[in-house]
């Protein structure tokens, strides 16, 4: 959701700020529908599981997952 939501633009340093992550998650939840969140989750899991090319997006998804774990106390 935080990677693919069209209403968000998380930049590199935003990922390290728990307040930005919380606010971004709230915006993405409010402005998306269930089917969109499901599609974004599938895309993120593909990248996170290594089923996508190793590129900048893959690195960003891994970094974002670690940041979500720190900010929310849950495993991304």
Image (cartoon, grey):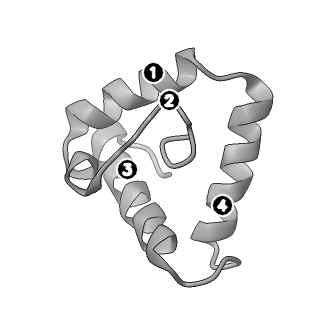
Marks 4,3: beta carbons within 8 A = no
Helix or strand or loop: what does disc 1 sit on?
Answer: helix
In this rendering, position of residue 26 left or right of residue 67: right
Helix or strand or loop: what does disc 4 sit on?
Answer: helix
Front residue (pair 53, 67): 53
Disc 2 to disc 3, C-alpha distance: 22 Å
Marks 1,4: beta carbons within 8 A = no
Where residue 50 appears, x then y in whole percent? 63, 79
Disc 2 to disc 1, C-alpha distance: 8 Å
> What residue do we see at 33% from left, 24% from top?
23
Q: Sequence-wise, which precedes: disc 1 or disc 4?
A: 1
Q: Quadrant of the N terminus?
A: top right
In this rendering, position of residue 31 left or right of residue 66: right
Where residue 37 appears, x then y in whole percent? 68, 35
Helix or strand or loop: what does disc 2 sit on?
Answer: loop
Marks 2,1: beta carbons within 8 A = yes
- Which residue corresponds to mark 2? 7
In this rendering, position of residue 66 left or right of residue 2: left
- Which residue corresponds to mark 4? 45
Helix or strand or loop: what does disc 3 sit on?
Answer: helix
- Which residue corresponds to mark 3? 69
């Amino acid at each position: 959701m935080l990677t693919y939501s069209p209403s968000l633009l998380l930049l590199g340093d935003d990922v390290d700020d728990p307040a930005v992550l919380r606010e971004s998650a709230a915006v993405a939840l409010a402005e998306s529908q269930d089917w969109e969140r499901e599609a974004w989750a599938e895309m993120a899991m593909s990248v996170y599981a290594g089923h996508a090319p190793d590129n900048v997006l893959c690195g960003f998804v891994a970094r974002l997952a670690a940041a979500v774990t720190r900010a929310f106390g849950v495993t991304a």
